[in-house]
Structures are given as structure tokens and as C-alpha cells.
Image: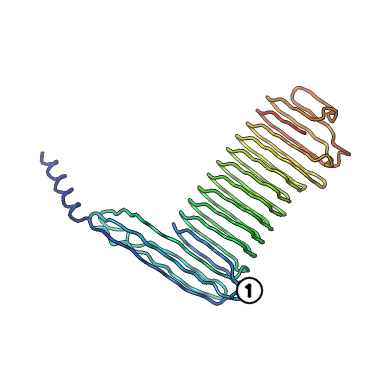
Amino acid sequence: MRAALIAAALSLGLAAAASAERIDREFHESFEVARGARLELVHGDGGVEITPWERDVIDVHVVYRAELKSIGAATKPDFQVDFSQRGGTVRVVGRETGRRGFGWFTSRNREHRYTVRAPAWVVLELDGDDGDVELTGWRAAVDIELDDGDVEIADVRGDVRLELEDGDVVIAGLEGELAAELDDGDVRITDCRSPRLRIRAQDGNLAVDRCDGSMEITVDDGDVELTRISGSRFRIRGEDGDVGLELVSASELDLEIELDDGDVDLRLSPEISASFTVETDDGAVRVSPEERVTSRSRHRVSGRLGDGAGTIRIRTHDGDVTLR
């Protein structure tokens, strides 16, 4: 009985201490920069939109608005942005503050966004927790790390590095190397020219269309679909998922696919030349036309396309292989 009375008293006290708060913050700073400049943006849970302009100025506008209800003796929440410039580096750090104390608060109608305008030649380094990133028309290197957010990139000429814990990636138009590591999210890439495209994904599907360049792809649990691809060197590995590859042109082809549990569908242009070897522990191997096969056994099929100048090696532990 006594415990119930104490709990009721505490509940009434907390309810009485409940209060509503509203945060309404806007920040705006501009920095003159020269070629070789770098923008380091730490944006937390905020979304980011970056667009190029002709001025030699990095212009950053930050909006943070939220309606909050606090219960107990929680410190009043707030939001701040730190701006600094040292040499050719501009650094912007957004910080949510005041989350300590006895109590808690909830938020609604939350708006948290960074709008950046800068010369397209500025090198970008973005570090976020839970916010989407949109980038268009860039002409320099881009480095993005997110815990939980989506990335959308269009018309970029420069090397790109992505590291995401949980989010999807869409890239439309890329000239430069791509290195991406994802734990949980889908990737869709179209119209790229990449001397080296490297993607490691733990759990998600990968779709690449109309791309030219060498590829290194590792997917633990997801399908890989590569269409209208040109290139010479390919390394594709997967644990649990199918691989489809449509190769329209290749010079001195060096292709290797290895799967634990998944099917392979390889579609080659008639002009492509290569010697091929397919090995599978438990699966069927189909080659069209069949006369390209020079040797067939229960677990191994080999053959020759054209003059056999390139090399194709496919290995699956449990899956079917189609080569046509």
C-alpha cells in the first residue's frame, strides 16, 4: 500500500512538472574560399542538401525547429551550430544540447536541415547520424558517413566514398572511383564511368545499369543485378543471393564470380572472347549455345567463346549457372 502511494505521488509530481518547450533556431554563415578548399560538415540527425553555384563562397543555412514536452527535471533542450574556418577548411558542427537531468522529453513537428551552396570544386566530408544527404552536380571528391540515412547523388565527377549503417544509396551519373560499405540498405547506380567500383554490402540488393569500369562487389545477403555493363575486370562474391550480369563489351576480360548459395545468370555480347570454367557442388550448368562447351563433368563445365582471349571463372556451392 505504501509503495503504491509513493508511486502515485511520484506520478503526480512528474505530471505536475511536465512542461512544453519549443525550439526555433536558424543559423547562417558564409565563407570565402579558394580552389582546394574543404567542407567538413557534422550534421547529426539533420538532412543535408548541397548544390553548386558560381561564387567562391561556401554558404551554410541551418534550420532546427521542434515542439517538445518535458517531464521531470530535465534540462531544457537546445540546439547550436559551431562554425569555423582554418586555412582552406571550413568546419560546421551541429549539436543538440541540454539532454541531461532527472526526467525526459519527447519531440514532434521536428525540422532539422542543412542547406549548403558552394563551388563544385570544394572537397566534401559529411558525417551524420540519422539524416538524408542530397548532392547534385559536384566536381570534387565526396566522403559521406551516416548511421541511418539515405544518400542520393547525381552528376558527380570525382571520387566518392560512402559508409552507411542503415540506408539506401541512389547514384545517377558518376565519373570517378566509388568505394561503398553498407550494413543494411539497397544500392542503385546508373550511368557511371568508374575506373574502380568497390561495394561491400551486408544486407541489401545492388542494381547497376549502364556503367563502364572494373568492379569489386561483395554482398552477404542480397541480389546483384548488373545490366548493360562494359569493363575488363570483375570480382563478385556473395553469401546468399543471385547474380545477374549483362556484359555488352569487354577487352581482355577477367571475370570471377563466387557464391555460396545463389544462381548466376551471365549474358554476354557475341563479340566477347574468353575461356570459361564453371564449378558447382549442387546445381545445374546451362550454356547456350551448347557447342561452346569443350568439357563437361558432374561438377565442372569448361568451354571457349570466340578466340578465348579472356577468362571467366564461376564457382557456386549451391545454385544454378546459366551462361548465354
Q: Quadrant of the N terminus?
A: top left
- Is disc 1 placed on a helix, strand or loop? loop
Residue at the location (59% across, 41% down)?
205
For disc 1, the marked residue is 35
Q: Please tell me which residue lies in front, 221 or 266.
A: 266
State left or right for residue 304 relative to residue 101. right
Percent from the top left, x then y, of residue 258? 68, 36
Quadrant for residue 117, please give it.
bottom right
- Farthest-out residue, top: 298
What colouring method underlies this structural image? rainbow
The correct choice, above or below, for 11 with respect to 157 in the image is above
Percent from the top left, x then y, of residue 124? 57, 64
State left or right for residue 148 relative to residue 35. left
- Farthest-out residue, right: 307
Count of number-bearing discs: 1
Residue at the location (78% across, 23% down)?
297
Percent from the top left, x then y, of residue 298? 75, 22
Circle 1 residues within 10 Å: few <14, some 14–19, many ≥20: few
Percent from the top left, x then y, of residue 53? 59, 70
- Give the amino acid type for the residue marked by disc 1 in the picture: Arg
Quadrant for residue 235, please give it.
top right
State left or right for residue 140 relative to residue 163. right
The correct choice, above or below, for 53 with respect to 242 in the image is below
State left or right for residue 87 relative to residue 297. left
Q: Please tell me which residue lies in front, 69 or 320.
A: 69
Residue at the location (13% across, 45% down)?
6
Residue at the location (55% across, 57% down)?
144
- Farthest-out residue, bottom: 32
Q: Quadrant of the C terminus?
A: top right
